[in-house]
Amino acid sequence: MTSFSDPVAVSGYAERTEQLEPGLHHLHRMAGLLLAERAASDAHVLVLGAGGGMELSVLSQMQPNWRFLGVDPSAAMLDLARTRLGEAASRVGFHEGYIDSVPDGPFDAAICLLTLHFLPEPERLKTLRAIADRLKPGAPFVAAHYSFPTEGADMDKWLMRNAAFAVASGVPAAQAANGARALKERLPVLSPSRDEALLGEAGFLDVELFYAGLAFKGWVGYRK
């Protein structure tokens, strides 16, 4: 998978992600709307996996009085986020590290996009619980990442569909095929039912699927 310390990979992150994920920009706007249903106009929002700054850019435009803590283990990706945000970076605290080193908050909302699929199930549950522990009761949380059947023909079908979308978006066919193989062999993807169950186990109520873009899924839930 992509190395987030490789300068070439970092510089091409936004374009590459747009080629792989259906409706990426709509996902960011939908996430902002869902968070705003419960988060106040002056909310402090936790953004886990904030490197690159795509969701921070959209959310800061949608909500000019929100403040953010952007968390990412890659200094290079956080630098990319700062550049992308421009003046809006003044409303963002940038934290290089993982969720266990993030201040307790409590935050008014949280979002984690295209990140949790890198974590094996035990680490994913631990991370979700750490997010929940840093939220106010009733605070909204949005997550979206790779999530599809993880066995047999159904898994292969969704990987092929995702590769076909990448090709239709301009990715060379051989590169898209290699990416599908890497997903299958190296990424600890969970099924949508298991992903949703983990959110409940971590302390989120009323979990709902709001986004399905081929091999990607997105949920919203609320801190107990």
Image (tube, helix red, strand yellow):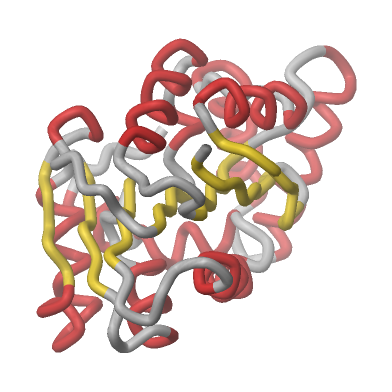
Q: Is residue 41 above or below residue 45?
A: below
Q: Residue at x 36, y 37 (%)?
A: 131
Kindly identify the residue that appears in the image at 12 percent across and 58 percent down: 94
Relative to the observer, which residue lies in front, 16 or 207? 207
Residue furthest to the right in view is: 153
**Could you say which is closer to the camera, residue 11 or residue 209?**
209
Rendered location of residue 182, percent (x, y)? 54, 26
Q: How many marks?
A: 0
Task: Answer with left or right where residue 212 lies relative to residue 201.
Answer: right
Q: What's the residue at 62%, 51% (across, down)?
A: 220
- Examine the image and state in which quarter residue 97 appears: top left
Q: From the image, which quarter does the N terminus lie in?
A: top left
Query: Camera-side residue: 44 or 3?
Result: 44
Q: Is residue 34 above or below residue 216?
A: below
Residue 214 in the image: above or below residue 43: above
Image coordinates of residue 36 in percent, x first then y, are 51, 73
In this rendering, position of residue 92 left or right of residue 224: left
Q: Position of residue 206 (x, y in %)?
A: 70, 43
* Residue occupying the point 36% across, 39% down: 2
Q: Identify whether 187 is placed above or below 95.
A: above
Question: Residue 146 appears in which quarter of the rendering?
Answer: top right
Q: What is the x, y in percent for residue 211?
A: 72, 56
Taking 155 as reference, is 197 left or right? left
